[in-house]
Image (tube, rainbow, N blue to C red):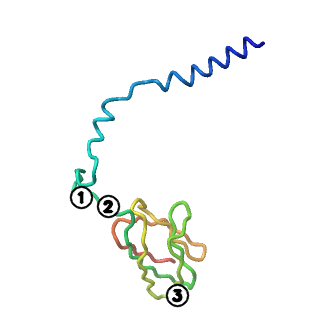
Amino acid sequence: MKKVSLFIALLLIALLTFPSCRKMDKKAEESASAERMDELTVTPAFSWGTARAVEFSLTSAKNGAVYIRNSKGDCFHKGMLSTGELYTISVMIPSAVSEVKLTQNGTSAVVPITGDKVTYRFN
């Protein structure tokens, strides 16, 4: 029994040791050539921002709270809509978000964000 336990222990040590002794890929070292920010080559079209302002213009036939959320349900904004009045608000939205879920009085709609303005009317 002791021999089997010793054999298993040595086998585990060998399995954990040998894979870590591989040589590093030289291509990975060569690709990391920029060491400072001013050495980076970045295309002019690249956006450094992580969020953008989107203007929402919302109307409704009913009074009620309105929620602007992402697809996971995280709330970006909560406001109050009045019957027939235009509700306009600028909200900072993460750049990666391409659509939002608008909810008012149990009515929900998934609306795409294609520019910096979103217009929606609740029925």
Q: Quadrant of residue 115?
A: bottom left
Pointers 1 and 2 in contact (C-beta within 8 Å): no
Q: Residue type at mark 3? A: Ser
Q: Quadrant of residue 48?
A: bottom left
- Badge 3, how many Cα within 10 Å: few under 14, some, many 20+? some
Secondary structure under badge 3?
loop
Above or below, comparing residue 88 to residue 4 in the picture: below
First in residue order: circle 3 vs circle 2? 2
The residue that label 2 is drawn on is: 48
Pointers 3 and 2 in contact (C-beta within 8 Å): no
Going by the picture, which residue comes out furthest to the right? Answer: 1
The residue that label 3 is drawn on is: 82
Above or below, comparing residue 13 to residue 102 in the picture: above
Front residue of 106/48: it is 48
Q: Which mark is residue 45?
A: 1
Place of residue 105 in the rendered image (x, y in percent of width and height, measured from the top left) = 59, 77
Q: Which mark is residue 1?
A: none
- Distance between the alpha carbons at the discs numbered 3 and 2: 37 Å
Place of residue 64 in the rendered image (x, y in percent of width and height, measured from the top left) = 57, 82
Place of residue 120 in the rendered image (x, y in percent of width and height, measured from the top left) = 44, 75
Quadrant that contains the N terminus: top right
Q: Residue type at mark 1? A: Ala
- Distance between the alpha carbons at the discs numbered 1 and 2: 10 Å
User: Residue at 26% of width from left, 46% of height from top?
Assistant: 34
